Amino acid sequence: MGKANSEIQINPYTFSKMTELRFLKFYGSENKCMVSSLEGVPFTEVRYFEWHQYPLKTLDIHAENLVSLKMPGSKVKQLWDDVQNLVNLKKIDLWYSKLLTKLPDLSLAQNLEILDLGGCSSLTETHSSIQYLNKLEVLDLDRCESLRTLPTSIQSKYLKRLVLRGCSNLKNFPEISSSGIHRLDLTHVGIKELPSSIDRLSKLDTLKIHDCTSLESLPSSLSMFKSLTSLEIIYCPKLKRLPDELGNLKALEELRVEGTAIRRPPESLGQLSSLQILSLSDNSNLERAPESIRHLSKLTSLFISDCKMLQTLPELPCNLHDLDASGCTSLEALPASLSSKFYLSVDLSNCLKLDLSELSEIIKDRWMKQSYNYASCRGIYFPGDEILKLFRYQSMGSSVTLETPPPPPPAPAGYNKLMGFAFCAVIAFSVPDHHHYWKGYLYCDLKVKSEGSYGHLHSWYLGEFSYLESDHVFLKIISYVEADSVFLRSYLSDSEDLVESFEEVYEVYFGIRCPHSQCLDCEVKKCGIDFVYAQDSRRPKRLKY
């Protein structure tokens, strides 16, 4: 029976006459099919029993041939008291039956494959018989927040999916016999430790340990996960160290260790030869990052933001593309290798102790001189209140005008190929904001003056930011391959001579977009634009404007 718009009262006597009933289904998110009792109703031939929002506190039936029992959102507190011979039963789904407090003895349901108890928030314990369900493939206890204990072991060798997310009062993790689990999510679970036997999950490729506020240690046996590609350990504030053996995870591609009490991660992280993403953000006690990460040749993204005690960064690996050290308020110096990185995006916002003179030299001598084939610096954000002096076109406020450009100054020796534009802006906040859980977006609009008015040509996204504790400089380079406007292509023509005549007047306007009203408290204080050159091994060209 499908969705009912009004309440329907079903007489139990109706079922008693259906002696050959095999399929029963009442469904719909607002199912209003009501019954006073099912006691004594013969369901001996029923194979499939589905009743959404089942209205009774118990399921007092005998259905020896039952194959699937599905009662999502039911009012049931317990299914039945006695042990039932349910040898054919393969699936029990009591999803979000919030009044369910306990399970019956399932020892005679030896063919059960799926047990879905997700959202059963009143469930305090599972019956010990589930550890002996040898064909169990799925055990879903998602958000069973009252659950305190599980059986000491789950012996099914066929278990493929175990969900314990949100079991905030669960104190023990069972011994698992199956090696078939690929993904394990332990978000917001109350355990203090993982058993050393967890290494039996030999096919695990994703392990999430989020918001485990009681977790104090990790077993060295984690290093036995030869197939693990993603490991996330996030907001486990009592965790003080990582196993030294973690470097043995040769297949690991993503490692996130955030919001812990770790002071010094092990140098063995430098042995993670497949690692592409490393995040050590929001570790307030972190004193140093491993020097060994310079050896991670596949690492493209390093996130180490909001580490308040971190004073220096390690030397950077060769293929790094993204570096986020924002909010590292004690950071004073940058690694020498920063100046040799190509195609790099760097976020140093709210790094208020940083030596800006060193950074300015890196920008001037390296990042504003492009390689011939690609841009060196995608973007960089750092504390400061001045447009870099090397920008020839700059002004107060949020716009700068380019009239018929004069010839460029002599390019550095060997750098005679115009490859792109550099945009620079200073952002200032007028009102302190201590609840900066929003994002602002810096953009740039290019307009051309025609017949006395400006027409829009192109827009570029330059970067995003949240609250900045002081004025900050945003620098972004747009290369030829990123240029989609007539303006840039006229400048960056690959022909023998660039555009001979250039009569138009252009205005470059910098602005901030934000879905929240807080953006009213920040503004573009200064802005600038300039040209970026690259070394060209071919014969020199005479650039014309």
Image (cartoon, rainbow, N blue to C red):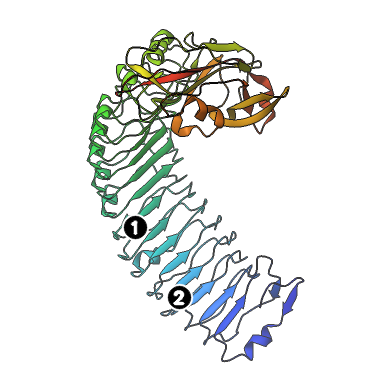
Give the amino acid at mark 2: Val
Vertical placement of residue 298 versus 172, above or below: above
Mark 2 nearby-residue class (10 Å; few <14, some 14–19, many ≥20): few
Give yes or no for contact between labels 1 and 2 (Cβ–Cβ under 8 Å): no
| Residue 186 shows in this picture | yes
Give the amino acid at mark 1: Ile
Which of the 4 quarters of the picture holds residue 60?
bottom right
Compared across the picture, whether 499 is left or right of 268 comes to right
Of 336 and 331, the residue lying toward us: 336
Give me the C-alpha separation between circle 1 and circle 2. 30 Å
The residue to which callout 2 is attached is 83
Q: Residue at x 52, y 50 (%)?
A: 145
Q: Secondary structure at mark 2?
A: loop
Compared across the picture, whether 128 is left or right of 511 comes to left
Where residue 309 sits in the image (x, y, percent)? 40, 18
Compared across the picture, whether 317 is left or right of 15 comes to left
Which labelled disc corresponds to residue 181? 1
Q: Residue at x 26, y 24 (%)?
A: 291
Vertical placement of residue 91 versus 531, above or below: below
